[in-house]
Image: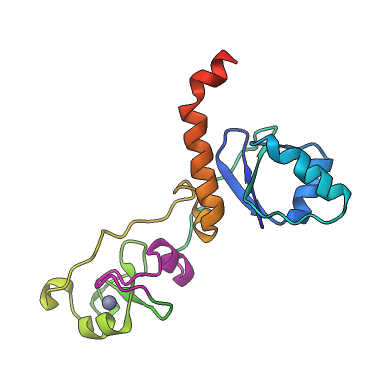
Amino acid sequence: MPVLVLNSSLQPLSVIPERRLIVLLSKQKVTFVDESVRSLIEESIEARRLELERPVIVQLLANIRVPRVALQPSRANILLRDDETCQYCGKRSRDLTLDHIIPRSRGGTSTWENLVASCKYCNGKKGNRLLKEVNMRLLRPPRPLSQEYAGFFLLRYPKLREAYEEFILSAHGGSTRVLSA
Ligand SMILES: [Zn+2]
């Protein structure tokens, strides 16, 4: 099970393998967001068999500055943004193509706003035409993925993402409790 690392501001930073967690712990760089996990993990590290069965989230003790990275509209990133779903008919598939909404032959560029995941059927149906010419529409307007986009990389780790969302909810919902403690 990979480990989610948050900045001390609670912004998701990266997902690391368990081995890396041991290093961060030994250097006292991180703390657990759920203290009840600590002893469990410390014991298993001692026993030299760290096998995490549930999502683990740690938080850096010191905030680090994160440069903003412009993500490229690569095939993998577009498929991730579009949840591996054809943006015309809504079919989920592992066998999707990328479609230029405004075809390249008509001046369309390879940008976040002009690329969507498309099944082969829809792509073939649309061909080199504009949406209005073939009476097709998009499920949603395509937007760029920014790094802030709910921790972009978390999309690849549904379990960690779920755990993170739960943690953020309880962190906000429990703020009065934290303050009065
Ligand atoms: Zn389709």
Residue appearing at x 28%, y 71% in the figure: 108
Residue 64, given in percent of the width and then of the height, sits at: 65, 37
Q: Residue furthest top?
A: 180
Which image quarter has ligand 1?
A: bottom left
94 part of magenta stretch: no
- What x and y, as percent, mark residue 76? 48, 69
81 inside magenta stretch = yes
Residue 56 vs residue 119, the one in the foreground: 56
Of residues 77 and 139, the one nearer the viewer is 139
Residue at point 69% right, 36% down?
Answer: 36
Q: Quadrant of the C terminus?
A: top right
Left or right position of 141 against 93: left
Magenta residues (range): 74-92
Instruction: Write down the quadrant of residue 121 in the picture.
Output: bottom left
Taking the spot 17% from the left edge, 74% from the top edge, the residue there is 130
Q: Main secondary structure of the magenta part?
A: loop
Identify the residue at horizontal 55%, vertical 16% (top origin): 179
- 161 to 133, vertically: above or below: above
Percent x, y of residue 12: 56, 44
Quadrant placement of the N terminus:
bottom right
Q: How is the image coloured?
A: rainbow
Q: Total marks drawn?
A: 0
Left or right, residue 92 beside residue 80: left
Question: Could one spot residue 68 in this view of the protein?
Answer: no
149 and 18: which is toward the camera = 18
Q: Quadrant of residue 67?
A: top right
Please give left or right for residue 92 compared with residue 180 in the image. left
Tell me if residue 121 can be seen.
Answer: yes
